[in-house]
Image (spheres, grey):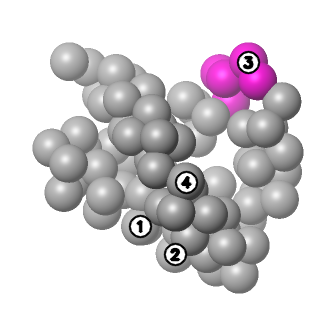
Amino acid sequence: MTMAGHAAALYERIRSNPEQTQALFRQALQDPSGAMASICQFGEDQGLPVTPDEVRQHLASLDDEASPRWVVKARGGL
């Protein structure tokens, strides 16, 4: 799997866990760079290593309404 594929798989794992999604969202509002670090660490823990740029690129490529709002709110680090 490519690193871009890792970002997509990691996004789905995070999205499928509402508690984790909310925790990351709250962290992103208060500490965007810390949220990015948490996302990357979660990727490492899941065997899906990603870089911050890969996460940003994946989020930018999504074609849904919620993700762009998430990115706008957490723009500092995400």
Q: Type of residue at label 2? A: Gly
Q: Residues within 10 Å of mark 4 (few under 14, many from 20)?
A: few
**Real-space Cα separation, disc 2 to disc 3, in angstroms:** 25 Å
Name the residue at the bottom extreme.
30
- Reading the image, the residue beneath label 4 is 18
Mark 3: few/some/many CA within 10 Å (<14, 14-19, 20+): few
Q: Secondary structure at mark 4?
A: helix
Q: Which comes before the other along the chain, label 2 or label 3?
A: 2
Determine which residue is flagged by label 3: 63
Tell me residue 1's x, y (percent): 20, 18
Q: Sequence-wise, which precedes: disc 4 or disc 3?
A: 4
Residue 38 is marked as 1
**Residue at x 76%, y 50% (from the top left corner):** 70
Pair 2/4: label in front: 4
Circle 2/circle 1 CB separation < 8 Å: yes
Residue interval drawn in magenta? 60-64
Say whether residue 33 is left or right of residue 20.
Answer: right
* Amino acid type of the residue that numbered disc 3 sits on in the rendered structure: Asp
Q: Circle 3 — which element?
A: loop
Separation (CA) of disc 4 from disc 1: 16 Å
Q: Mark 2–mark 3 contact, CB under 8 Å?
A: no
**Screen quadrant of the C terminus:** bottom right
| Cα distance in 3D space between marks 2 and 1 | 6 Å
Tell me where residue 47 appears, x and y as whole percent. 15, 44
Query: Mark 4 or 1 closer to N-term?
Result: 4
Check disc 2 and report the residue beneath it: 34
Asked if the residue under mark 3 is in contact with the one under mark 4, i.e. CB atoms within 8 Å, the reply is no
Question: Which image quadrant is residue 13 in?
Answer: top left
Type of the residue with mark 4: Pro
